[in-house]
Image: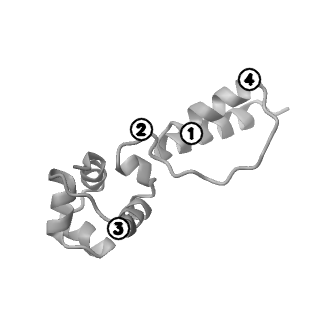
Amino acid sequence: MLKNIKKLREELGISQQTLGDAVGVSQQSINKYENHSVEPDIDTLKKLADYFKTSIDYLVENTDIRSKAQVTKEYELNEAEQKIINSFRKLSSKRQQTVLKIIDELINAFPN
């Protein structure tokens, strides 16, 4: 049972049929993924993760981090910077956008 698929689908307010159509499986398959011990094949998991803009690990409940891993550049960070980045990565996309807006507002309110 993949609870996070149901959770994400309900957050978007879409039906099992709509999700099934989007990833190329039947409504019955989505129902089985959400409510029974049936797991999708890897190709379907990839499609589901892409559809929800999340990782397969999140879908199969290996992590609580919803966002996909992103390519990052290597920087030398101090301890505080590392903590900020690690905390930021744990946030949902919506909350990450809120943090970025707050940072922009702080920069504009207190220019160097």
Left or right: 46, with 79 as reference point? left
Name the residue type under label 1. Answer: Arg
Residue behind mark 3: 44
Dot in front, 2 or 1: 2
* Residue 77 falls in image quadrant: top right
3D distance between C-alphas at marks 1 and 3: 25 Å
Identify the mark nearer the N-term, 1 or 3. Answer: 3
Instruction: Locate the C terminus and report the quarter of the image it occupies.
Output: top right
Q: Position of residue 96 (x, y in %)?
A: 54, 42
Q: Do tag 3 and tag 4 residues touch (Cβ < 8 Å)?
A: no
Q: Position of residue 33 (x, y in %)?
A: 22, 57
User: Which residue is pictured at 61% across the width and 33% down the height?
Assistant: 86
Q: Secondary structure at mark 1?
A: helix
User: Which residue is pictured at 69% across the width and 32% down the height?
Assistant: 106
Task: Sort mark 4 into few (<14), some (14-19) or many (20+) by Cα contacts within 10 Å.
Answer: few
Q: Secondary structure at mark 4?
A: helix
**Residue at the outermost right position:** 112
Q: Which mark is residue 64?
A: 2
Dot in front, 2 or 3: 3
Q: Secondary structure at mark 3?
A: helix
Left or right: 23, with 32 as reference point? right
Identify the mark nearer the N-term, 1 or 4. Answer: 4
Residue behind mark 4: 79
Q: Which mark is residue 100?
A: none
Dot in front, 3 or 4: 3
Residue behind mark 1: 89
